[in-house]
Image: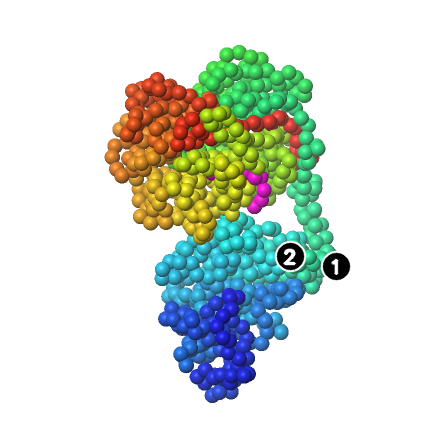
């Protein structure tokens, strides 16, 4: 009984046609699937009833016969009461067949559609399924198509696993069950909604793929709703790869929820490593359920906690169990937090500043009487200036007035000065300024994100070597007693912020991953540097962290599921708890009051609009959502936009705007997107995603959506089209990143450049050059911006510091921007006809300033523009960030 696709040819009617296949006389038709039909038949030799599976006449080819034989051989090696026994396999009257044990009953899928299953029965069914699969795995058989349609339930609720048509028999060994590919061609076989992530990706498989599929079945048993189904194959695949299922409700015991979560781990190394382990846990749970102390759970419907699809009411027993669990949770929380779970609504926020622009990066003075912040820019690498304000109603005082990018202001322990990080094209240094005004001075070079341990000792981030590898170190303010604490393993990763626990034993770390993006949870590491520690806080992008005054609680600012809020977690072994909720506010920053009674954070919204500059002036492009990236098609007729619509499960999507008609169409939205590029002929889109386990993937899809997206490469991002059917991208390795190329189908993947790189920016219109940033030892030990011939050859240095260089579609202009992009302008440099380069700067050390001296250079007053065929037409974005500081009360929060 395969899928639900029914055979369209004339169906045999056993009662009318008196059909016999070999020694089997057909009695009635039981069902059909994609490969064949199943009949109740009589074995005329042994006079017993069997289920006879016949290949469709139009599917009776060699591959189908091999699959039928594989199913028979796989099942024939197994002798277990929960596995459907195979009696015979053969070929008669031109039809391949397999004869198996006839089991009266219905499929688990039919049973779930018909009615809920009580807990005792449901757990018993799940345990039988696991026992059957454990038996198969012990004999070297991986099923690879575990789903409710392949499980028969007898009227007595005995489960029988059948249909080993996709099973793979592997040699037994003393370790894990051997790995195998999906098919000889490497294609995907199976039923998509029940595939494991590795099965979807077409990777080699082992027994743990069945464990994931069983986890999906178990989730359906508990909730009567599929954990990943998204209405389309592409959406379901994306959910399997990137999304966590909705939590099961309080009607499902916590131990059973834990078993489900462990089965559904996307990283198979974190799953149950064998069905035997899963079976032991299920049997232990069954014994607990049967014990007198667990009788309150008896009879609870497994679906009582999740009535989304069938609208069922919770029963009295389900309510009783929910109350018992709620009481236990309250007792635990009282013991752990001495209060109920903290939830702070926006109505409880107290506003501290009232500026008409952006206020970010708050820091509290040691006595709690002053607040420092950055006004006029974002919280990180801001174009704004450092301010200080006496609380609650003092006048804000501006302390800096320079063009350096800034972040991370903090007070010195005596509260007389504010230190902050200032970044230019050459260094990341800590500067200091008096709180009552004065000239800023450099406190410590190559030290950023600095915080104070005491009057003399500090902890800070520093760049190691010649790239952007940044880690955490400690020293005195004159850099004596220096010691490393934590450096990420990857040479592109950057640990930017740190905070030492009150007892001086632990450090909270905020870090970027190997792509230079805020996509990691925070980390807690030992202050003595003895290990790399472990992740802390919610599973999301953590951007700020702090300890409570007694070190008992860690506080975080983190973006989870697209929304930034405040979180806390008991140290050392608590569970992350969200403090602020809702979509109306987005909090960033954690400035904890000295008594830990409140947090000052930045609250507000980033708004952005998309504009087209044409000969007649600028015009607004009406789009819903925040436009994060936009580019004109090569013919200048369409704009492709990466838009954040702020909705779940995937707020980011690619939208195309037709400039002539104004028509807007969302063409890609089923994936957690990080970036994209469109081929010059507007036929293909390539895009980058990241899974919940942190794996970066590049996919491609036709823009007309005639076929689903396909995964191209893994461990790679920053993809650009070199030609309509060829890509260049940044490959992400264990310690370094490299520039690679491949066909748009993933074929012929190879490295372009032997040195490691930091990032890539653009590809020339002729596809011969790629602009990247990294180290060129022959030129400079520091990172430079350079152009590398894709087919081999010597690179050309463009800037002796980070800058952005790209081409207009027709190749008539280069556009250049500096980094950090604090000026908000783009420099256009004309290229002589028939050439790919203008006269390059003779003083690359001056960066963009050197480009401004080239003949014909002119400035566009916007950053990160997208040029059309005619440089008088371009797309740009306008952003307005309205944020202010608010105090969030934490009454009784573990002080």
Question: Residue 858 is drawn in which quadrant?
Answer: top left
- The magenta segment is 640-649
Q: Contact (CB < 8 A) between labels 2 and 1?
A: no
Which residue in the protein does label 2 denote? 309
Q: Is 868 or 670 nearer to us in this picture?
A: 868
User: In the image, what residue occupies the spot 56% across and 22% down?
Assistant: 375
Q: Give the quadrant of the C terminus.
A: top right
Q: Position of residue 743 (x, y in %)?
A: 34, 46
Label 2 or label 1, whichever lies nearer to me, is 2
User: In the image, what residue occupies the spot 46% across and 75% down?
Assistant: 54
Element type at mark 2: loop
Question: Which callout, 2 or 1, points at the residue further toward the start of the chain?
Answer: 2
Question: Residue 425 is drawn in which quadrant?
Answer: top left
User: In the image, what residue occupies the spot 48% across and 27% down?
Assistant: 613
Residue 642 in the magenta stretch? The answer is yes
Q: Is 367 or 732 nearer to us in this picture?
A: 732
Q: Position of residue 721 (x, y in %)?
A: 37, 40
Q: Is residue 258 visible?
A: yes
The colour scheme used here is: rainbow
Which residue in the protein does label 1 denote? 316
**Res 774 label:** none
Element type at mark 1: helix
Distance in Å between CA atoms under marks 2 and 1: 20 Å
Q: Where is residue 276 in the image (x, y as percent from the top left)?
A: 50, 63
Q: Is 864 or 597 nearer to us in this picture?
A: 864
User: In the image, what residue occupies the spot 48% across and 46% down?
Assistant: 691
Q: Where is residue 95 in the image (x, y as percent from the top left)?
A: 42, 77
- Relative to 30, residue 328 above or below: above
Relative to 466, is 82 on the left or the right? Answer: right
Q: How many marks?
A: 2
Q: Can residue 240 be seen in this view?
A: no
């Amino acid at each position: 009984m395969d899928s639900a696709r029914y055979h369209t040819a004339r169906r045999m009617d056993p009662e009318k046609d008196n059909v016999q296949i070999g020694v089997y006389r057909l009695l009635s038709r039981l069902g059909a699937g994609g490969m064949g039909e199943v009949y109740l038949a009589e074995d005329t030799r042994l006079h017993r009833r069997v289920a006879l599976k016949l290949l469709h006449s139009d599917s009776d080819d060699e591959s189908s016969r091999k699959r039928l034989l594989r199913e028979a051989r796989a099942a024939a090696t197994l002798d277990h009461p929960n596995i459907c026994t195979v009696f015979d396999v053969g070929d008669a009257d031109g039809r391949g067949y397999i004869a198996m044990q006839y089991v009266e009953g219905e499929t688990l899928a039919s049973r779930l559609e018909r009615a809920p299953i009580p807990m005792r029965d449901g757990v018993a069914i799940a345990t039988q399924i696991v026992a059957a699969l454990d038996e198969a795995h012990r004999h070297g058989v991986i099923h690879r198509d575990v789903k409710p349609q392949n499980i028969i339930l007898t009227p007595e609720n005995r489960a029988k696993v059948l249909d080993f048509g996709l099973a793979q028999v592997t040699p037994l060994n003393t370790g894990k069950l051997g790995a195998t590919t999906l098919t000889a061609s490497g294609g995907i076989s199976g039923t998509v909604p029940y595939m494991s992530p590795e099965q979807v990706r077409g990777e080699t498989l082992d027994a743990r793929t069945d464990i994931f599929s069983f986890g999906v079945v178990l989730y359906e048993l508990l909730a009567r709703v599929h954990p990943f189904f998204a209405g389309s194959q592409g959406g379901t695949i994306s959910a399997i790869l990137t999304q966590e299922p909705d939590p099961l409700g309080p009607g499902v015991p916590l131990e059973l929820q834990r078993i489900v979560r462990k089965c559904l781990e996307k990283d198979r190394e974190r799953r149950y490593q064998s069905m035997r382990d899963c079976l032991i846990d299920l049997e232990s749970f069954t014994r607990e359920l049967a014990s007198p102390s667990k009788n309150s759970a008896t009879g609870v419907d497994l679906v009582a906690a999740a009535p989304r699809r069938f609208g069922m009411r919770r029963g009295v027993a389900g309510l009783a169990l929910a109350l018992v669990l709620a009481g236990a949770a309250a007792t635990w929380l009282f013991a752990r937090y001495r209060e109920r779970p903290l939830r702070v609504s926006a109505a409880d926020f107290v506003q501290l500043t009232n500026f008409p622009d952006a206020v970010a990066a708050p820091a509290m003075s040691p006595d709690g009487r002053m607040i420092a912040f950055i006004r006029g820019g974002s919280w990180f690498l801001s174009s704004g200036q450092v301010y200080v304000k006496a609380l609650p109603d003092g006048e804000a005082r501006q302390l800096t007035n320079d063009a350096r990018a800034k972040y991370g202001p903090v007070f010195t322990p005596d509260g007389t000065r504010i230190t902050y990080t200032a970044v230019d094209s050459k260094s990341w240094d800590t500067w200091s300024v008096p709180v009552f005004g004065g000239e800023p001075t450099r406190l410590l070079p190559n030290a950023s994100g600095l915080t104070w341990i005491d009057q003399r000792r500090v902890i800070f981030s520093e760049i190691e070597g010649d790239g952007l590898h940044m880690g955490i170190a400690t020293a005195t303010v004159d850099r004596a007693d220096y010691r490393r604490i934590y450096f990420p393993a990857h040479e592109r990763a950057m640990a930017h912020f740190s905070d030492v626990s009150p007892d001086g034993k632990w450090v909270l770390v905020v870090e970027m991953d190997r792509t230079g993006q805020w996509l990691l949870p925070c980390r807690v590491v030992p202050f003595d540097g003895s290990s790399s520690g472990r992740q802390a806080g919610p599973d999301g992008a953590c951007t700020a962290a702090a300890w409570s005054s007694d070190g008992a609680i860690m506080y975080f600012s983190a973006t989870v599921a697209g929304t930034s809020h405040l979180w806390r977690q008991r140290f050392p072994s608590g569970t992350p708890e969200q403090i602020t909720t809702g979509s109306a506010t987005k909090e960033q920053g954690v400035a904890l009051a000295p008594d830990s009674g409140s947090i000052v954070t930045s609250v507000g919204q980033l708004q952005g609009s998309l504009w087209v500059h044409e000969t007649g002036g600028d015009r607004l492009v009406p789009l819903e959502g925040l436009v994060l990236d936009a580019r004109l098609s090569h013919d200048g007729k369409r704009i492709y936009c990466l838009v954040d619509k702020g909705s779940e499960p995937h707020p980011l999507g690619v939208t195309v705007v037709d400039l002539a008609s104004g028509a807007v169409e969302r063409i890609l939205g089923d994936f957690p997107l990080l970036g994209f590029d469109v081929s010059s002929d507007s036929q293909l889109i390539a895009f980058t995603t990241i899974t919940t386990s942190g794996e970066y993937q590049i996919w491609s899809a036709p823009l007309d959506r005639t076929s689903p997206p396909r995964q191209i490469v893994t461990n790679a991002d920053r993809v650009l089209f070199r030609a309509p059917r060829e890509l260049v991208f940044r490959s992400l390795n264990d310690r370094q990143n490299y520039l690679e190329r491949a066909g748009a189908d993933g074929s012929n993947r190879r490295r372009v450049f032997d040195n490691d790189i930091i990032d890539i920016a653009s590809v020339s219109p002729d596809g011969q050059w790629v602009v990247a940033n990294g180290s060129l030892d022959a030129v400079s030990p520091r990172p430079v911006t350079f152009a590398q011939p894709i087919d081999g050859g010597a690179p050309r240095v463009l800037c002796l510091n980070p800058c952005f260089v790209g081409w207009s579609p027709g190749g008539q202009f280069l556009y250049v921007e500096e980094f950090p992009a604090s000026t908000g302008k783009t420099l256009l440099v004309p290229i002589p006809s028939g050439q790919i380069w203008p006269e390059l700067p003779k003083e690359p050390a001056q960066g963009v300033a050197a480009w401004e001296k080239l003949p014909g250079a002119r400035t566009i007053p916007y950053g990160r523009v997208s040029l059309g065929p005619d440089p008088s037409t371009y797309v740009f974005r306008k952003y307005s960030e309205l944020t202010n500081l608010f105090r969030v009360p934490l009454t009784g929060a573990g002080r």
